[in-house]
Image (spheres, grey):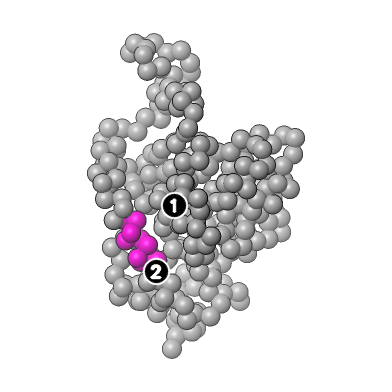
């Protein structure tokens, strides 16, 4: 079951999730979308197991000072090439429960317990091992992670200033109530009345790459065809998804590059000075 998102944080709305719970619900899966902490304490009040998708939220911190992924629920992080820290492919699961850790360690390692021999297995498992080479690439970046995250936060602050004058543009919500975003992407929503895909095309014509990001999952072909999902079910998500564009964003982006993107976006929206 899906549920709609909060219009400010764009994270799963706890009230909408509560309303979607049925006797068949086995767990809640909040995503910390675009690196902004989801309201996990509100989901905890539902009394169901929680699995957190923290793939985009490395470095994010909840209002009470607990790092995203460290509340004790299983949380997954992604290290795909576009992430804050990358190993090319792969990721990480954080857990608080020692038994669960042992099971995950075993299942990703073809069902072998840590004290077992080379060719003995006490359960069925998979080969989900992150290779030593990939891990080495990740560990080298881990040493620079604070700097890389600070770089993204600096670029985000610069974008916020440079885009402030564009009328009707939706910006990522600022940190509020003590929650801290782990900057991953810089996604804006084009003003109502503009076609997002036209804006992406116009930006391309001005030499600026951008991407529609993210589409609403329930409207993807598989979910339409398999479960019969249609427009109108989750209006907040659908409106935001239809207007969202990811702008160029990387830790080393210069102020001049940010200003160039901002000027191109203003022009693409017919708001050039
Ligand atoms: C929120 C979120 N969940 C899941 C994934 C999938 O991660 P992976 O491709 O490493 O399985 C990604 C990123 O690609 C993501 O951003």
Q: Which residue is denoted by mark 2 in the rendering?
A: 157
Magenta stretch: dominant secondary structure: helix
Does label 1 point to a residue whose CB lies under 8 Å from ligand 1? no
Which one is nearer the viewer's eye here, 147 or 81?
Answer: 147
Residue 257 relative to residue 43: left or right: left
As drawn, 150 above or below 45: below
- Give the extent of the magenta segment: 148-156
Which residue is drawn at the image coordinates 59% and 46% (left, top)? Answer: 41
Q: Earlier in the sequence, mark 2 or mark 1?
A: 1
Look at the image and tell me whether residue 197 can be seen: no
Image position, residue 78 (x, y; %)? 42, 44
Which one is nearer the viewer's eye here, 203 or 247?
Answer: 247
Residue 151 relative to residue 213: left or right: left
- Residue 60 - label: 1
As drawn, 51 above or below 243: above
Image position, residue 224 (x, y; %)? 66, 49
Residue 153 counted in the magenta span: yes
Which residue is drawn at the image coordinates 50% and 58% (left, top)? Answer: 178
Q: Do the residues under discs 2 and 1 have CB atoms within 8 angstroms?
A: no
């Amino acid at each position: 079951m899906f549920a709609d998102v909060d219009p400010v944080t764009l994270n799963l709305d706890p009230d909408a999730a509560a309303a979607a719970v049925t006797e068949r619900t086995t767990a809640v899966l909040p995503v910390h979308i675009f690196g902004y902490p989801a309201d996990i304490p509100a989901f905890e009040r539902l009394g169901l197991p929680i699995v957190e998708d923290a793939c985009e939220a490395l470095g994010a911190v909840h209002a009470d000072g607990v790092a995203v992924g460290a509340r004790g629920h299983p949380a997954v992080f992604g290290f795909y090439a576009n992430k804050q820290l990358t190993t090319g492919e792969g990721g990480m699961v954080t857990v608080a429960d020692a038994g669960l850790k042992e099971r995950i360690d075993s299942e990703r390692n073809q069902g072998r317990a840590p004290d077992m021999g080379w060719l003995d297995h006490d359960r069925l498992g998979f080969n989900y091992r992150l290779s030593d080479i990939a891990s080495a690439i990740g560990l080298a970046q881990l040493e620079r992670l604070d700097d890389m995250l600070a770089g993204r936060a600096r670029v985000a602050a610069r974008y916020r200033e440079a885009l402030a004058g564009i009328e009707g543009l939706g910006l990522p919500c600022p940190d509020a109530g003590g929650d801290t975003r782990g900057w991953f992407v810089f996604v804006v929503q084009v003003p109502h009345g503009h076609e997002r895909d036209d804006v992406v095309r116009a930006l391309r014509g001005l030499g600026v790459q951008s991407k529609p990001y993210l589409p609403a999952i329930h409207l993807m072909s598989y979910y339409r065809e398999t479960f019969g999902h249609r427009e109108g079910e989750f209006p907040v998500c659908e409106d935001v998804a239809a207007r969202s564009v990811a702008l160029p964003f990387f830790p080393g982006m210069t102020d001049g590059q940010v200003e160039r993107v901002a000027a191109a976006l203003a022009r693409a929206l017919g708001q050039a000075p």
